[in-house]
């Protein structure tokens, strides 16, 4: 037991009811610890990311931290785990004031965090990843003994992952599970989760959260979960705190608060019901047709395996699936960023190889995920980035000379029309926030004659307001007769927007339904690979 | 390489005269063992450095500085092993410069590597002028040809102690990467910097150390050049082994034992020319001597693809990102 980092803190806890393998440590009851922050303030230059935030998390509770992007949730938890130091205020862990100067110190106190991005080492196996996360990794690792201990630990866990699999070979859901397993392996008393379910299927999310809830109930651990999903807050958590613009704006027991209350606290205004105006219209002409597309991923493994689909004018076809099932590669082939073994793409009845001339001729627009990386040159100005599709054509170019004035004028119009918040058309696009980069790219792609729009995770990481606005733009494009192919990991988004829904799993389209007949249950099952 | 092949030539002609055409494989084997030792050390060193997430092209500089330091110290102290030790020390200093410079913000490891390479080679030529005509005690050889009565075979199979050390080192490094804490830390830093930081390790410190040790091994490889084969100090001593070893590590997929096999392959390629000439094949001498360079090129073409990143490449490596 002494080999384990968490055990230093477990000395005062009750002795184990039965002997366990050394790596498994002591169990538990009552070892969960509480957290209290008092008047916590953090400034970055002139910007106050977190302003006098005070909140309390009871030991053994499952607590949700709600808030929009930029509300200060990440700043708060980063201060708690020692990634950042607060400028003012104090942090109490297990009722004792603590200076947490580094994640290592947090981990000594039994506080651990599961990050939104994965922190597994890709070319190490699950076993190696677990061993290396310990503070007291032995100098020489006796793998035979370590494996026995790890197997014993896995036996007690609600989900199992092969210890020998390299982390890079795991699906996103499995990686998330390993991240959580690792924290449990380290015997955390206080666990912080940053949007843990964003990459999981609904069933997987329920499984993981249900398990955490159970562990909280038994008093083994306290969980603080950052989330956007009100459904999860209502279904699993005991209490909730809401941050808005860096301030604590409310909270309490989850049972006392309705979803509407929470949403109002979060955005500060009542949400209007989702606009579902949709003029009934027969299906238009087929615009995009894909038959038998096959492509490999960066590692040379087949990622898109025989995908066939079609999108007609005036409809949104949503492809939903857990990330890493070939959607990224599919979009890259459509965008001309990836070589396919068999593209099989035709647009408006003509073969399409994602050339610039073809994109212009057929009015193809693409809003890829991570637009700053995939569709922008971060160091170039907003105006230049907005002109990528047209800069070399009249009236922005004359006899091979670019007309900067024209380009700037157009950019200013677009910035206004799409509400891009930027210091000016001439500032580098890389300096803008995620939502504004998204707006700028959307402005570029949706201007002019657009007959086919391909959008991949268009609202990933954006706040409520930006999400609504971008969704409205997509609907508007559809209503104007554009064929829209929406690829998303967010089932709610696909359900809200799509006329037809396809489920992609392991590089194939495994399920298709119309929105009217869509059943969340069966979509979820197919996303999780259960096609029976 | 010309300097080396001339010396090899003389030794191998004896083998060839004694054995005729049968001497060719033996000559290639002997050549492989000799010519591969510097490749072996540089490649193992580079393997360690790259596993930590940095590319050190400056190993050529460490190698040449090591060659000079080894020769000079062997000459001064009369003990070749003191020379090897000094070579490692000087090599690690070159690695320290590279490691520290690359830890500054917005400094590119490849650019610094090229600078270190030019710096090391230039400095060694400048400091080495007085040693050009000198001689120094050589490193001892292990006679693996003892079973044969032929003097030629014996001379071809006398293997340097450093080669033996290098061959033992390769599997030890595999063990290091698999079963020691520090080996796993190096892999962690090289594969996911964030994860290493979250676990409380300083990627910067690990990388500087890995670069130092890697560069020290390049220095030892250099000492082999000046203290054993071809021996002596001259400005044409190295012929880009330090650079070719980088290609070799990629070819070997960052695996120490494959690095060893690849080093042997490169050594053998370098020995084809002299081995053939020793049995009287007079055409294409320079063509065959170019074999290692052609091999480098072919390997790079096969290993690098526009469509996929390298399988097994450490994630933090600037070429893999």
Image: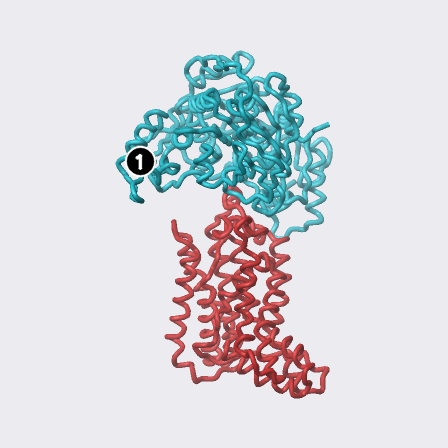
Chain colours: A cyan, B red
> For the point 38% across and 40% down, which residue is it?
A378
Q: Toward which corner of the image does residue A39 lie, by quadrant?
A: top left
**Image coordinates for residue A329, horizontal then vertical, percent:** 56, 39
Would you say residue A435 is visible in this rendering? no
**Image coordinates for residue B190, horizontal then vertical, percent:** 52, 50
Badge 1 local density, few (<14 within 10 Å), some, or many (20+)?
Answer: few
Vertical arrangement, residue B194 with respect to residue A364, above or below: below
Q: Is residue A182 left or right of residue B90?
A: right
> For the point 59% across and 71% down, which residue is it?
B269
Would you say residue A148 is visible in this rendering? yes
Subunit ID for the residue under disc 1: A
- Give the total number of marks visible in the rendering: 1
Vertical arrangement, residue A41 with respect to residue B172, above or below: above
> For the point 53% across and 72% down, which residue is it?
B290
Q: Say which of A415 and B48 sits in front.
A: A415
Q: Say which of A144 and B271 sits in front.
A: B271
- Residue at far left of view: A405
Q: Say which of B141 and A146 sits in front.
A: B141
* Residue wearing tag 1: A395
Q: Toward which corner of the image does residue A43 lie, by quadrant?
A: top left
Vertical arrangement, residue A119 with respect to residue B57, above or below: above
Q: Label 1's element?
A: loop
**Image coordinates for residue A416, horizontal then vertical, percent:** 32, 26
**Image coordinates for residue B115, horizontal then vertical, percent:** 39, 62
């Amino acid at each position: 037991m002494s080999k384990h980092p968490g055990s230093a803190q477990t000395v005062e806890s009750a002795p184990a009811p039965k002997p366990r393998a050394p790596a498994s440590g002591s169990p538990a009851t009552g070892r969960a610890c509480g957290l209290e922050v008092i008047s916590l303030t953090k400034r970055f230059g002139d910007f106050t990311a977190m302003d006098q935030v005070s909140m309390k998390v009871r030991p053994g509770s499952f607590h949700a931290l709600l808030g929009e992007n930029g509300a200060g949730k990440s700043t708060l938890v980063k201060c708690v785990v020692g990634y950042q130091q607060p400028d003012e205020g104090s942090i109490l862990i297990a009722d004792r004031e603590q200076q947490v100067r580094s994640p290592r110190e947090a981990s000594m106190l039994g506080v651990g965090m599961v990050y939104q991005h994965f922190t597994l080492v890709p070319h190490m196996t699950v076993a190696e990843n677990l061993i290396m996360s310990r503070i007291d990794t032995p100098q020489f690792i006796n793998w035979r003994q370590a494996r026995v201990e790890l197997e014993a630990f896995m036996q007690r866990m609600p989900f199992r992952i092969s210890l020998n699999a390299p982390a890079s070979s795991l699906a996103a859901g499995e990686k998330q599970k390993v991240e959580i397993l690792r924290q449990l392996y380290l015997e955390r008393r206080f666990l912080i989760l940053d949007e843990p379910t964003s990459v999981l299927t609904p069933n997987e999310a329920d499984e993981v959260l249900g398990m955490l809830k159970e562990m909280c109930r038994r008093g083994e651990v306290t969980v603080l979960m950052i989330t956007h999903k009100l459904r999860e807050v209502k279904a699993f958590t005991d209490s909730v705190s809401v941050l808005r613009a860096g301030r604590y704006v409310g909270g309490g027991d989850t049972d006392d608060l309705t979803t509407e209350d929470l949403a109002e606290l979060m955005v500060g205004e009542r949400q209007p019901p989702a606009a579902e105006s949709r003029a009934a219209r027969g299906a238009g002409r087929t615009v995009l047709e894909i038959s038998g597309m096959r492509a490999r991923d960066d590692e040379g493994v087949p990622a898109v395996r025989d995908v066939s689909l079609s999108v007609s004018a005036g409809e949104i076809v949503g492809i939903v699936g857990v990330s890493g099932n070939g959607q990224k590669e599919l979009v890259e082939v459509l965008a001309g960023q990836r070589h396919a073994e068999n593209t099989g793409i035709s647009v408006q009845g003509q073969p399409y190889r994602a050339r610039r001339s073809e994109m212009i001729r057929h009015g193809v627009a693409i809003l890829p995920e991570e637009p700053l990386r995939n569709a922008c040159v971060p160091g170039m100005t907003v105006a230049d980035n907005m002109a990528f599709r047209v800069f070399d054509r009249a009236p922005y170019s004359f006899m091979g000379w670019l007309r900067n004035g024209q380009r700037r004028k157009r950019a200013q119009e677009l910035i206004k029309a799409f509400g891009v918040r930027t210091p000016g058309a001439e500032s580098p696009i890389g300096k803008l926030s995620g939502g504004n980069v998204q707006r700028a790219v959307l402005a570029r792609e949706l201007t002019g004659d657009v007959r086919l729009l391909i959008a991949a995770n268009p609202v990933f990481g954006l706040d409520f307001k930006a999400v609504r606005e971008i969704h409205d733009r997509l609907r508007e494009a559809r209503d104007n007769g554009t064929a829209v192919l929406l690829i998303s990991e967010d089932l709610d988004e696909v359900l809200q927007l799509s006329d037809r829904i396809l489920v992609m799993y392991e590089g194939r389209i495994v399920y298709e339904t119309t929105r009217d007949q869509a059943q969340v249950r069966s979509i979820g099952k197919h996303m999780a690979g259960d096609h029976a | 390489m010309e300097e080396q092949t001339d010396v090899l030539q003389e030794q191998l002609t004896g083998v060839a005269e004694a054995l005729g055409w049968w001497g060719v494989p033996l000559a290639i084997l002997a050549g492989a063992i000799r010519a591969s030792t510097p490749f072996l050390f540089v490649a193992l060193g580079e393997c360690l450095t790259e596993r930590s997430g940095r590319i050190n092209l400056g190993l050529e500089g460490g190698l040449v500085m090591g060659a000079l330091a080894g020769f000079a110290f062997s000459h001064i102290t009369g003990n070749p092993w003191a020379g090897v030790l000094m070579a490692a020390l000087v090599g690690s200093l070159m690695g320290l410069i590279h490691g520290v410079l690359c830890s500054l913000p917005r400094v590119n490891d490849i650019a610094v590597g090229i600078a270190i390479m030019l710096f090391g080679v230039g400095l060694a030529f400048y400091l080495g002028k007085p040693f050009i005509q000198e001689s120094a005690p050589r490193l001892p050889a292990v006679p693996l040809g003892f079973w044969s009565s032929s003097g030629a075979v014996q001379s071809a199979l006398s293997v340097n102690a450093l080669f033996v050390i290098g061959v033992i080192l390769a599997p030890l490094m595999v063990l290091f990467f698999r079963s020691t804490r520090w080996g796993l830390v190096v892999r962690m830093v090289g594969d996911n910097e964030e994860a290493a930081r979250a676990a409380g390790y300083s990627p910067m410190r690990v990388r500087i150390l890995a670069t130092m040790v890697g560069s020290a091994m390049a220095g030892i490889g250099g000492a082999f050049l000046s203290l054993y084969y071809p021996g002596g100090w001259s400005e044409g001593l190295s012929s880009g082994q330090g650079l070719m070893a980088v290609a070799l590590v990629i070819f070997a997929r960052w695996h120490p034992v494959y690095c060893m096999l690849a080093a042997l392959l490169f050594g053998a390629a370098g020995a084809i020319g002299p081995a053939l000439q020793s049995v009287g094949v007079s055409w294409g001498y320079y063509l065959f001597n170019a074999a290692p360079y052609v091999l480098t090129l072919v390997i790079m073409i096969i290993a690098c693809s526009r469509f996929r990143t390298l399988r097994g490449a450490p994630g933090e490596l600037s070429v893999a990102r």
